[in-house]
Image (cartoon, rainbow, N blue to C red):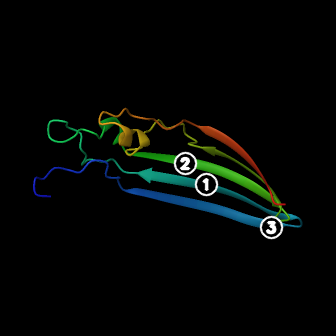
Amino acid sequence: ETDGRPLYQIRPFEAAVQADYKNYFAHGSYNIGAATRFVAKQTRGDFDAARGLGIDKREAAKGFTVADLYAGVNIKDKYGLRLGVNNVFNKKYAEHISGDHVLALSPSVVYAPGRTYWLSLHAAF
């Protein structure tokens, strides 16, 4: 605080909102839902190596919003099938704090994957 420099790797404001609808039928239940994650732009970072370490990267300090959609079916609470799409709008973004920042004093920006489809099967024995 005394020298007025920002600390490096400080996470920006983040909020997540999720809506899920669940209903039952004779043999189990099903659900559908959506999730949205908002991450604000990080304006105070250690971007300049002349004033600090320069670990933070401006490309990774940009704000972003991503949306996910998912659905699932459970049969008698023993078997389940879930499917979804993450990053529905195929937004290009990078997390301000990533594992690469910990490993090096000159980290590279690691971008998150684009639109991703997934399917999972669950069974209880």
Horizontal side of 82 relative to 28 (left or right) equals left
Number of callouts: 3
Horizontal side of 46 relative to 120 (left or right) equals left
Q: What is the x, y in percent for residue 92?
A: 47, 35
Label 3, label 1: how many angstroms apart (C-alpha)?
A: 19 Å
Horizontal side of 96 relative to 114 (left or right) equals left
Res. 18 image quadrant: bottom right
Question: Disc 3 designates what residue?
Answer: 24
Numbered disc 3: secondary structure = strand
* Frontmost residue, 99 versus 17: 99
Q: Are marks 2 and 3 in contact (CB under 8 Å)?
A: no
Q: What is the x, y in percent for residue 45?
A: 25, 46
Numbered disc 1: secondary structure = strand
Label ID, residue 53: none
Residue drawn at 36 percent across, 51 percent down: 40
Label 2, label 1: how many angstroms apart (C-alpha)?
A: 7 Å
Residue drawn at 20 percent across, 50 percent down: 6
Numbered disc 2: secondary structure = strand
Kind of residue at badge 1: Ala
Residue drawn at 40 percent across, 38 percent down: 100
Question: Disc 2 designates what residue?
Answer: 67
* Frontmost residue, 27 versus 32: 27
> Mark 2 or mark 1, which has the lower sequence index?
1
Q: Are marks 2 and 1 in contact (CB under 8 Å)?
A: yes
Classify 10 Å Cα crowding around label 2: few (below 14), some (14-19), many (20 and above).
many
Label ID, residue 34: 1
Q: What is the x, y in percent for residue 53?
A: 22, 40
Kind of residue at badge 2: Ala
Kind of residue at badge 3: Tyr
